[in-house]
Image (cartoon, helix red, strand yellow):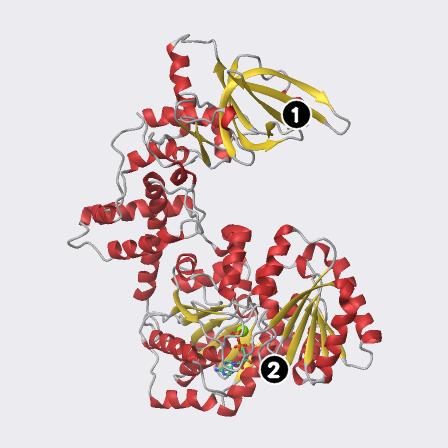
Amino acid sequence: MLELSTPVQYIKGVGPRIAEILATKGISTVDELLHYLPFRYEDRLNPRGIAELRAGEMATVIGEVRNSGLFRTRRMPIFQLTVGQGRARLRCLWFHGAYLQGKFTPGQMIALYGKVEQDRDGELQIVQPQFEILGHANDGANGAEKKASESLEIGRIVPIYESAGQGHLTSRWFRRIIRTALENLNPDLPEPIPAIVRSRLRLVSPREALWRVHWPEAGESFEDLQSSRTPAHIRLIFDELFFVELGLELKRRQQKAQTGIAFRLDGGVRAAIKKILPFHPTAAQKRVLQEIAADMEKPYPMRRLLQGDVGSGKTIVSFEAAIIAIENGYQVALMAPTEILAQQHYFSARRILENAGYKIVLLTGSLESDRKREIHRHIAQGNAQLVIGTHALLEEKVEFSKPGLVIVDEQHRFGVMQRLRLMKKSGDGQEGSRALLGTTGSHTPSQKGTRVHTAVAEPDVLVMTATPIPRTLALTLYGDLDLSVLDELPPGRTPIVTRRVADDRSPEVWEFVRKQVAAGHQVYVVYPVIEENEERELKAAIKMYRELSGHIFADFKVGLLHGRLDPDLKEQVMRMFQKGELHILVATTVIEVGVDVPNATVMVIEHAERFGLAQLHQLRGRIGRGAAKSYCVLMTGGKVSEEGERRLDAMVRTNDGFQIAELDLELRGPGEFFGTRQAGMPSFRVANLIRDRPLLEPARREAAAVVAGPNAEVSPEELRRALVHMRGRWQRTYGLVEVG
Ligand code: ADP
Ligand code: MG
């Protein structure tokens, strides 16, 4: 008898070699094999008659091989197969099909699946169909073995699996081995989901789910099967989401159980915040600040994600939070993903906060070491109240005397390691005394005099991002963070007008730029520089800069900004543009995030087709920041792919970051969109975060209810079972993340 945890080698028909192939698919136990779901199904219960086929439809046809052969055209060899049903015939073609020679013999029964097309003479045919040889029409009943196997292939809805081992393990093979596994599986499968949840969501049992997802019953809706919406699918998907959510819920609770800093928010602090505000906050900014402030007042560490589209005004909110911490006598660290952005934050912080007497320092990797040491000292001695920097803040030997709040801007731009590190440090507070998070221990030298041996208080963490992830997704992806959303732009913005222009019309574009500059505005001209072609593209950008500055706009001041420039020069160029001393800034994507120059009203993006959608939206977010009307010109050169067309269309059609994110998600799929591994996102076996989004919210809700147990709904035994199962699952499947 097989258990779910039994290694696949114990299934009859799986030897060491096959086990090795299966391992490459992530299958080493019976459980994993049974979660290897069909990617589609074929309706071989009601296969189509050849006579009733229509051009354009996808169809399953079962017929008898009549003849086959290879013929050579001038361009390529084509393999042709004719299949018959009585007098009706259907032709199938495979281009470059030499490999099929000798595969078919007349009289064989064969199942075909593909798109029906009409050839030039109006005859129907299927090109490159998927096929499966079912046996011989005259085989009759030669042995029980044959009969049983035939029943797996025809006269039912048949599961189709992705093959493995370069076709060594076919769909047909999987069908049999999974069937064998199911038949020998212990019928008493453990049920880790509490009864109340099962009944609220009308979940079928694990055993029924596994059987029916592989071997659908005759009455099953074919559409539901194809879209993974049968009760069997829903059970397996929910199962996976539920235990992820359970883990996240526990993490959230653990965080709340840690010792944090309970900041005071009295009249004095409120007045200090009011004093610095350069404008009336939007209603959204007020609401979000309240959410943050409420967290900061609580005695456990804040872990909050602030999500707001480009230009929604996140910076000022983070400054307000900073004041709460500083007024309480703590230090604040603000981390930005690029030096340019760190510098910009530094300048605006000084503009907005320095009058109020706050001490602000900038710490980036490119500082001279003497200067760095001096700043380190200021930080360690507690003179610096707001420390702004790049990830140098995490990586270097920076010791804070009294860290209270860590703000991470544009979190999505940080690399894998930083995020993991950040989360880890903020999670356990155990790891050494060097890093920013988890440093408040009594070991830091600066605290020797005033060593306090009470529990270590974790600083609060506020993470900001402009990636507008739909709420339910964000809650799973960043499930250990609470979420605030800035869903309103500051007043007085006119929507950005976006146009697409082929680059042979650049003279018109430059003419338009000229008019805008003459009207007192500033302009970005952006070039793609993608890492793999960096050298060449950088040259192109520099060449274009010469062309623009030397000829086309010889009478204007034009600057150049790219990643390879010396940091001092970068800073100088950026500052000149900010002050309006440059009319036009030719730049690579270094300006992608965060840069804020409200007087810049035009962005020309060259080779816009090469950029990703999210990136285009981020770039465009650099304009439309003031009251004057802004324009984004997407120039395209050469051929644009179909997907490229959809990206450009979306940009022209909408300014709404959420709509753009949805489309981006659709175009790239969740893995790429989130940079799956990078974000530490669990990789699911059956669930798909896009397709199964409607199940996320119930999974979250039920997980929260279960963690709140044991109670009248969830018995202690059920709770224990669920937690044990969840731990196993997280360890096995989601690797990195440990849960209590
Ligand atoms: P992001 O959310 O993209 O980081 P910023 O914080 O850079 O946005 O803000 C974008 C621009 O809007 C800045 O120039 C900022 O000064 C301005 N801004 C922010 N909030 C308001 C407000 N309530 N009223 C007017 N302007 C605002
Ligand atoms: Mg910003």
- Which image quadrant for residue 603? bottom right
Residue occupying the point 63% across, 26% down: 93
Residue 485 quadrant:
bottom left
Q: Distance between the residues labelled 2 and 1?
A: 62 Å
Q: Is mark 1 on a helix, strand or loop?
A: helix
Helix, strand or loop for disc 2: loop
- Residue wearing tag 1: 97
From the top left corner, tell me how far across and down residue 244 is, in percent: 36, 51
Between residue 332 and residue 321, name the one nearer to us: 321
- Point out the image quarter for the N terminus: top left
The residue beneath circle 2 is 628
Which residue is at the front of the view, 546 or 732?
Answer: 546
Q: Which of marks 2 and 1 is nearer the N terminus?
A: 1
Q: Which residue is drawn at 38% across and 32% down?
A: 214
Q: Where on the picture, by quarter, is residue 177?
A: top left
Type of the residue with mark 2: Ala
Q: Which residue lies furthest to the right in this view?
A: 551
Residue 177 shows in the view: yes
In this rendering, would 597 be left or right of 326? right
* Image vertical order of residue 88 relative to residue 60, above or below: above
- As drawn, 24 above or below 156: below
Q: How crowded is mark 1: few (under 14 residues within 10 Å), some or many (20 or more)?
A: some
